[in-house]
Amino acid sequence: MVSGSAAQFLTKTFYDKLKEGKLIGCRCKKCNFVMIPPRLLCKECGSKDLELVEFKGTGTLETFTVIHVPPMRLKNVAPYVTGIVKLDEGPMIMGRIVGVDPNKPEELRMGQRMQMEVIEEDGKPVLAFKPVS
Amino acid sequence: MGLQRGVCVIGAGMTRFHHKIHKDKSGRELFVEAALEAMESVDKGIERKDIQALFVGYFTPSLYEHQGHIGPLVTDWMGLTPITGWRTETACASSIAAFMTGVLAIASGWYDVVMVGGVEKMTALPTEGVTDALSVAADDDYEIPAGATFPGLYALLAQAYFKKYNMTWEDLQAIPIKNHHNGALNPKAQFQEEIMDIAKRIGQREGVTFKDPLDFLKSKYNRVIAWPLRLFDCCPISDGAAVAILAAEDVAKKFTDTPIRVAGIGFGTDTLALHDRISLTSFASAVFASRQAYKMAGIEPKDVDVVEVHDCFSIAEVIATEDLGLFERGEGLKAAVEGRTALDGDRPVNPSGGLKCKGHPVGATGAAMIHELWKQLRGEAGKRQIPDAEIGLAHNVGGTGASCGVVILRR
Ligand SMILES: [Zn+2]
C-alpha cells in the first residue's frame, strides 16, 4: 500500500513509480474498485476518496499481437510483441511482451502466466511482461 | 425522445477516395469538389446563399497539412463567409459528428439548410507518418508506449474474438473478399477490383498462380501488418472528401420531391484504452449509439434494409454487425462466411465496398456512408443497389470504438 494525496493520482506518478520497478494504480475507499493506472475520480462510483495501491505485477495474457509495421519511433525495434495482461488483482493493462520470439507468435498462448518487467526506451520506462512457465 | 423538428438529406456528393489521383489537391480543395457535387445532386437545385451553416469533420489536419481552423477555411473556400461553421473531431467518426451537429442545428430551429461533411488529406505523409497520425486516436500515455498501432489494436480484438468464438483468420477473409466484390461495383471506390483479379495480376507479374482468393491471401504477397492481420485485413490510406446537404422537413420540398428523412441518431463513447474495456469483442459505444438511434427511429435491427459499417479492419465489420444487433453474439463472422452479408444475402453489409475498398480518408468516412445510403434509398446505386431499400443505417467508429455514431435514414 502506498499512501497519497490527490496530487499523486497522476500519470507522472505512474511512470515515476514504474521507473522504480513498481506498478501502481488506485483503489476506491468507498466502493473498493481497483484501477490501473491511477485516476482522480473512481471510474465506478465517482468518489474522490482513493488510495494508491501497488500491484504484484503478475497476471495472465488476455490477448496479443506482433507489430510488423511500427510507429516511426519503433522502426528499429519491429517486429515486436504487444498485448493486454489481466493482473491478478483484477484490472487489465497493455504492455510490451518480451522474452518471446516475434517470428514465432504461435509459441505464445492466451491465458499464459505473465510477470512484469520494466524496459527502457528513449530514456523512459516502458511497462513490459514476460511469460513465466 | 425524437427530433423536435424533422430533418432530411436533400443532397450528397463525394470525391472518389484514392491514394494517388488527388496528390496535388489540398484538403480544402477536396472539400470544395465534394461540396459542389452535393449541390449539383439537389433535384430542384440549390444556391450557395441557401446554405446557412457548415460543419466539417477532419481528424488531424494539423499533422497532415499543418493546418488548423478548418471550419472557416472551408466556409471561405466555398465563398460562404460569414455563415456559422466549425470543425468537429471524433477521430475516424469526425464527419458523423459533423452530420449530427447539422441535424441538431436544424432540429433546434437555429437554421433551415445546413451543409455537413468531412475530409482527410492523408497522402501528404509517408506510411509511418500516417501510422503516427492515426495513433493519436489511441491513449497516448498508456497504449502508445506499449508499441500499439491501429492495426495492432484491432489485431488484439481479432485474437480475442477468435478465441472466444472458436473462429479463425481464414474465416475472417470472408470480409475483404465480399467487400472487394462490392467495391468493384462502386465507381467512387479506391479499389474497384475483385481479390481474385488482384491475385491474377500479381501472379502474372511474379510468375505464380493462386487457386483461389484464400490461397493468395495466405501468401507472402499479402504481408503481415500486425499478426494475425495482414494487408488485406486493413483499409488503405486515402485522400478524399464527402458532403451532404440537410434541410428542415418543412422546407425540404422546395429542393426535392424525394427527401431522405433522418429517422434516428445516436452517439456513444468508451474508454480510449482497450485494456480498460469490459469486453474485447464488442464496442459499448456502438451498442449505446445504435440502441439510441433505433429507439428514436422506432425500429428494430431486423427492419434495416441496408447497412454501412466501419470496417477499418476486417474484424471491425464482424464486431459492428453484432453490436448493431444484426446478428447474435458470436454469429457475425459465421453469417459473413455463409454469405448472408453479401449484396444478395438477407443482411447486406457495406454495399459500397466498405472502408476496405471504398477507401478511408478518416474524417470523410461518416459523410461517405451517408452518401452511400442516400444513393441506396433513392434507388440510384447502380449495380450494387439493394432492391427496394427503404431504411438505411450508418455506423461510424472513432479509434477502437471510443467514439461511435449511428445514423438511421428512411425513404
Ligand atoms: Zn468507487
Image (tube, helix red, strand yellow):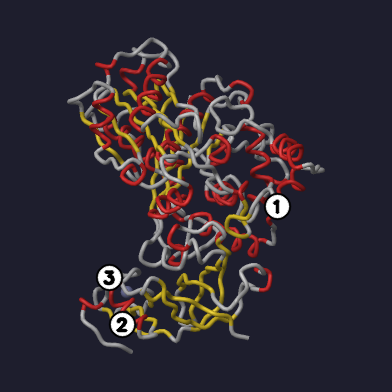
Numbered marks: total: 3
Q: CA distance from mark 1 to mark 3?
A: 48 Å
Please, is residue B196 above or below residue A46 in the view? above
Q: Is mark 3 within 8 Å of ligand 1?
A: no
Residue at (47% x, 28% y) in the render: B371
- State yes or no: Cβ of the residue under disc 2 lies below 8 Å from any atom of ligand 1: no
Q: Nearer the viewer, residue B29 or B278?
A: B29
The nearer-to-camera label among 2 and 3 is 2
Q: CA distance from mark 2 to mark 1?
A: 48 Å
Quadrant housing the N terminus of chain B:
top left
Could you confirm whether marks 2 and 1 are on the same chain? no
Q: Position of residue A107 (x, y in %)?
A: 68, 73
Q: Determine crowd level at label 3: few under 14, some 14-19, many 20+ residues with C-alpha closer than 10 A.
A: some
Q: Position of residue B291 (x, y in %)?
A: 45, 47
Q: Quadrant of ligand 1?
A: bottom left
Which residue position is annotated with label 2?
A52
Compare residues B158 and B123 and report the one nearer the observer.
B123
Q: Secondary structure at mark 1?
A: loop
Amino acid at dot 2: Leu
Disc 2 crowd, CA 10 A, few/some/many (<14, 14-19, 20+): many
Chain bearing mark 3: A
Q: Name the amino acid, label 3.
A: Leu
Mark 3, residue position? A41
